[in-house]
Image (cartoon, coloured by chain):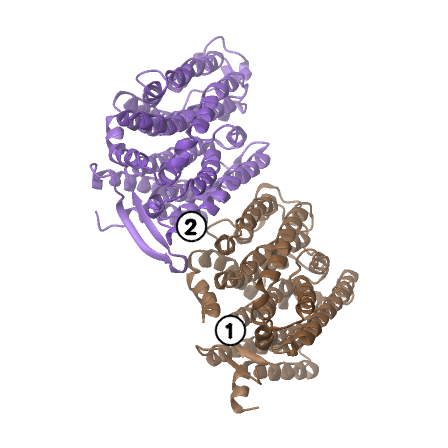
Chain colours: A brown, B purple
Amino acid sequence: MSWNDVIVLLPEIFLTGSICMLLLLDAFSDDRSAMGLHRLSMLALVLTAGLVVWGHGEAATSAFYGMFINDTLAEILILFSILCTAIVLVLASPYLRQRRIAIGEFHTLTLFALLGVMFLVSAGNLVMIYLGLELLTLSSYALVALDRDSRLCSEAAIKYFVLGALSSGMLLYGMSLIYGATGSLDLATINAAIAQTPHMTLMLIGLVFLMVGIAFKFGAVPFHMWLPDVYEGAPTAVTIFISSVSKLAAVGMALRLLDLGLGNMGPYWQQMLAVLAVLSLVIGSLVAIVQTSLKRMLAYSTIGHMGYLFLGLSAGTAFGYASAVFYAVAYSLMATAAFGIILAMSRAGFEADQIADLKGLNQRSPWFAGMMLIVMFSLAGVPPLFGFFAKLLVLQAAIQAGMLWLAIVGAVFAIISAYYYLRVVKVMYFDEPADDTKLAPNSDLSLRWVLSANALVLLVLGVTWSPLLEWCLRAFTS
Amino acid sequence: MSHWPLLSLLIWVPIAGAIPVLFAGQNRPSTARWLTLLISLVTFILSLALLFGYNYNSGAMQFVESHAWLPAIHSRYGLGVDGISIALIILTSFTNVLVVVGAWEVIRDKVHQYMAAMLVLTGLMIGIFAATDALLFYVFFEAMLIPMFIIIGVWGGPRRIYATIKFFLFTMFGSIFMLLALIFLYLKTGNFSIAAMQHVPLTMTEQTWIFFSFLIAFAVKVPMVPVHTWLPDAHVEAPTGGSVVLAAVMLKIGGYGFIRFALPITPDAADHFAWLVITLSLIAIIYIGYVALVQEDMKKLVAYSSVAHMGFVTLGLFIVFILIRDGSVDMAKLGIQGSMVQMISHGFISGAMFTSIGVMYDRMHTRMIKDYGGLANVMPWFALFMVFFGLANAGLPGTSGFVGEFMVIIASFHASPWIGLAAAFTLVIGAGYTLWLIKRVVWGEVRSPEVAAMKDISAREIFVLASFALLVLWLGFWPEPLVHLIHAPITELVHTLGHSKL
């Protein structure tokens, strides 16, 4: 270990220290509203982001004998994870306060999960991937169960935990097989060893198991069963985190494993991803149509969106990877806004998580109806919103890679999925409000500002996203 | 004048204008109305300015603006217009003014949102006609669905939700395949410039795929048989202003798309499949004419007659290929000119027809033909306009409805007498369904006490209808300025179509 290694790892070290401080502060403080804790957490996030930007050079650096990689991909994913975590913290605070859910634990667990993401997306070694993933998922299980008096929450947490543990086991088993075939845990070494390995069958079986783990993390069909239940059951504040930051982590994990570690087996996993993509598009789009719960509908729409993301990944080109990262960023910003609006409409005792709950929102609160309109059309992929360009890029990647049929499938399901986003707009704009008392957006000012900014960013980025794509491309062209 | 980014102003003045309308008009409907009228008039005057700076002898793009937009995928913020675009842009901004005046007292609920949606819609449609970058075109093309979706859904009739979702999904279904084609062309040419796409050589297989994806996109918009079914629904349920914009401008986007994309980018495939489009056009002209005959709902009748009239547009555009093959280039030009004149004329006539039906609906709250009768007795002024527009819709010489159809029919006769005969047949059916409508609604005895109580049109309504009427007459007697405006780009287009890309 040298001094340089510590410098490379500085953001993670800083965040770990901050979390420990926050833990202590939470234990000994009697500030029930936890405003001080919230502000310190935000400060820690800002400083961590500053350290990430400061520590990132033009060239990729690695530390601790290749365990940890600091490159542009890691920088992009970490920075957007920090951004989404910050949005989550701002949106969650009034929500948790009103429901008297442990707000201190929420902050520390969220930050621990973020730490897991940071390790996961910077991993250069199978062990690091597993450790980062476990830190993220274990914190997530606890987050889902945070509202301990709610039976729905507990059910969701147990489901998440059992299936998550199973998929982690699969992933670990796959890793052990690959280790057995190549004799290394280092991703770059594994990739180099693929050409000469005599154990190709073993590698393939290992790859299949890794794929299961990755697909589970994304929630791709047929490993999606946990996703609607967890999204629906978890407190909305936690759903925002899982739907945004976890997806950024998943795309990081997939790229580390598949591109860095198994890039030379591309033709095999590209086919698998294509199959997963088609299945996710079909199930995600069709099942979402019949949902009456808004959270469940958005959960199925997530599955569909992961299908689009896989289009980019399965192209197997630098542009494809960049478009997948771009898609993950776009999706996570849309998810924070979509679930954020559900959160903003809810009060203690009224979760606003049914589609019918938004009836007549345009008459109650034209501003938030307008914001939700932007988010829904962005998710549906209508220009000039951000979501359209994300779809455009993955379709382009698919066509460029010669997979025209995949692009056509993606296009067809874009139309089908437009239907259920339109339905939300219909409920908000065309229907009369159900009664007079319900449905008023949360009055917390910072929540309103952050949410509005989040939705408007989808419009602004819709016409100015070019630098973001160039940034993503830089991660894969060096 | 040339230093002004005139096209950008035309697009962004109405769109940006929607923001103050939305905020200032929330509790003050009359502020929203006057502000919207002001913005619409400014837009209209700006669009007229295009006529003065335009070089009539050049078929090239003019008022060109080009700025870096999305360098990562080589898409530029590129605007430019030729005579074809200018004619359609002026139609758009003009229709918008009349729609705003027409909605003055009719829309009472959420006035500011209605006006804002109309302004955004206008800006986006102008953007469609002005874009020289295919991605920019597509962005406007799709974004336009959002305000129209809201307009039909919020202010529409009883089945508005079904109609508006159908409208949205049909159009999106068409355009998404065009998006794939555009991406393919981008990968081929290296940028999204429409001009570059028009020049890139393509094999027949490529052209066929691209042609059909364009055909789906624009056939839905025009609409052509058999993808026209969204139109009667959307028209019937939309508020009057929505119907007017749909008929007068939005359908023209389909025709414009053929002229700008499908014909020049895939000339060989278009040539090869011209028979298909010509057949579908003739089916639209004849069969849909008969469908219109039996309608009991006035709006539906006019909607079907729109499909039939737009059949002339596609016929005129694709008959060109037969004419070019025969070597009669002048006739080919006449066909395309006929299509363009027909598009503009149909914009005026159908806009006026829907406004007239709106006038009746505001008084009686029914669109059924059987509820009316003898309007001439109680509303003489209105009857004058209604009869006039009916005759124009039937293609009476001296009105704009005659000019475009006549040009297309002449061109068709040159291509094949049978096609010409079939197309000319529409004059009979068109006169049939329109005059029968007039007979049942306007003439005869006063049908019921409700009809007897109907008031004649107000000064505001006279203004809207008279504006349409003047233009219908002007174009009917003296189409020369319009033909002159579109002459150079059409010559260029026919020249392009004469050269194979293989």
Check whether the beta carbons of the residues at disc 2 and disc 1 lie within 8 A of each other. Answer: no
Nearer to us of marks 2 and 1 is 1
Task: Tell whether B486 sits left or right of B385.
Answer: left
Under mark 2, the amino acid is: Ile
Could you tell me if residue B26 is visible in this image? no
Q: Residues within 10 Å of mark 2 (few under 14, many from 20)?
A: some
The type of residue carrying mark 1 is Glu
Chain assignment, label 2: B
| Residue B350 shows in this picture | yes
Where in the figure is residue B87, as x and y percent of width and height?
31, 35
* Picture quadrant where residue A21 is located: bottom right
Return the residue found at the far bottom: A2
Which residue in the structure is indicated by mark 1? Answer: A75
> Residue B143, image x and y in percent?
46, 46
Q: Check if mark 2 and mark 1 are on a common chain.
A: no
Secondary structure category for the residue under label 1: helix
Residue B469: assigned label: none
Task: Residue at 39% x, 47% y: name it.
Answer: B134
Residue B163 placed where, x, y %? 56, 34
Where is residue A23 shown, x and y percent of the image?
Answer: 67, 81
Q: Is residue B184 above or below residue A238?
A: above
SS of the residue under disc 2: helix
Image: B321 above or below A189: above
Instruction: Name the residue at the top extreme.
Output: B445
The number of numbered discs placed on residues in the rendered structure image is: 2
Q: Depth check: B449 or B44 in front?
A: B44
Q: Residue at x 76, y 67 (%)?
A: A166
Which disc is residue B19 wearing?
A: 2
Q: CA distance from mark 2 to mark 1?
A: 37 Å
